[in-house]
């Protein structure tokens, strides 16, 4: 697993200019965004996450950015977020551009994609993920606590067992497509819990965060993939149940496993 990469850059522009040639367009957009952010005193800190920050970027990488905004200026910043995004380049489209939205996804005509999230500066007290710090006027992120435990950590196993019960129910009704979708949801919940158990940052991202840090996948994960037929879905679901049971056994989990073992 890689080490956390949250750090303050002594010269963020020099670092950006040193990015690989494959992400030259992203680097140019990031420089323009940094210029705009530095000119806006409402933004107290600016950070970058994702593959570009980790040094794993390629031509397909987007810019995953966060603006830490002074609490008393937060609402006005949200109103100006779309105009800030326009300073980065010519936009093809903007998703989630609704009044007061703290998050924008922007597709630029040159192919660059930008995720722009505004958060209140006080939210740093709840913990932050590993980030590359491009601007920090007040030392806000220097001593910020690590990411708080994900709110869903205690729920993921319970939800997974509930989804497995539903999967069995759908198979008994002959609703194969609904069972297929439930299996996908169970696998995602399993991967989230696996990431959390391994201490991987942002475990709520599941497979994405595991691969980002070159973490190990659960044993037998490939056996949880099924074809679109009842027998194979039940087989894969039983494997999921065995993997989940390795983390927790309780009466409901035993009940679900017994149902999966007895096709209706």
Image: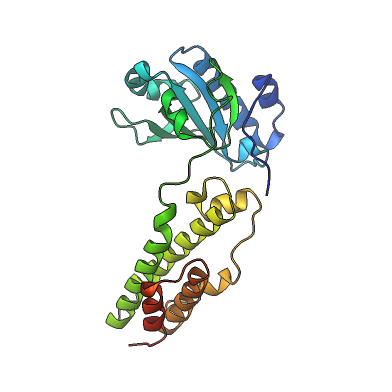
- Which of the 4 quarters of the picture holds residue 165? bottom left
- Which of the 4 quarters of the picture holds residue 7? top right
Horizontal side of residue 155 vs 16, given as left or right: left
**Residue 112 appears in view:** no
Of the pair 98 and 260, the residue shown nearer to us:
260
Name the residue rendered at 65%, 31% in the picture.
Answer: 24
Name the residue rendered at 35%, 16% in the picture.
Answer: 72
Instruction: Measuring from the top left, give residue 43's x and y in whole percent.
Output: 46, 18
Q: Quadrant of the C terminus?
A: bottom left
Horizontal side of residue 213 vs 195, given as left or right: right
Name the residue rendered at 52%, 46% in the picture.
Answer: 202
Horizontal side of residue 14 vs 178, given as left or right: right
In the depicted structure, whether residue 226 falls above or below residue 9: below
Name the residue rendered at 46%, 24% in the picture.
Answer: 68
Of the pair 126 and 160, the residue shown nearer to us:
126
Instruction: Measuring from the top left, give residue 145's x and y in whole percent.
Output: 53, 33
**Residue 2 appears in view:** yes
């Amino acid at each position: 697993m890689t080490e956390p990469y949250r750090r303050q850059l002594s010269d963020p522009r020099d670092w950006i200019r040193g990015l690989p040639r494959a992400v030259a367009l992203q680097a140019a957009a990031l420089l323009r965004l940094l210029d705009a952010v530095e000119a806006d005193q409402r933004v107290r800190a600016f950070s970058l996450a994702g593959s570009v920050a980790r040094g794993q970027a390629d031509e397909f990488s987007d810019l995953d950015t966060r603006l830490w905004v002074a609490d008393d200026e937060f609402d006005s910043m949200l109103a100006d977020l779309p105009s800030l995004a326009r300073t980065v380049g010519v936009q093809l489209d903007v998703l989630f551009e609704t009044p007061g939205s703290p998050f924008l996804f922007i597709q630029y005509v040159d192919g660059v994609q930008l995720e722009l999230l505004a958060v209140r500066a006080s939210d740093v007290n709840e913990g932050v993920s590993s980030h590359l710090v491009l601007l920090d006027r007040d030392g806000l992120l220097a001593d910020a606590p690590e990411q708080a435990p994900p709110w869903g950590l205690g729920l993921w196993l319970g939800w997974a067992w509930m989804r497995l019960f539903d999967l069995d129910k759908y198979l008994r009704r002959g609703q194969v497509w609904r069972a297929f979708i439930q299996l996908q949801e169970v696998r995602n919940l399993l991967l989230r819990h696996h990431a959390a158990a391994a201490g991987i940052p942002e475990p709520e991202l599941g497979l994405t965060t595991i691969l980002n840090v070159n973490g190990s996948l659960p044993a037998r994960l490939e056996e949880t993939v099924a074809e679109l037929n009842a027998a194979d879905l039940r087989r894969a679901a039983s494997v999921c149940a065995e993997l989940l049971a390795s983390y927790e056994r309780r009466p409901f989990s035993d009940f679900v496993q017994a149902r999966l073992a007895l096709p209706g």
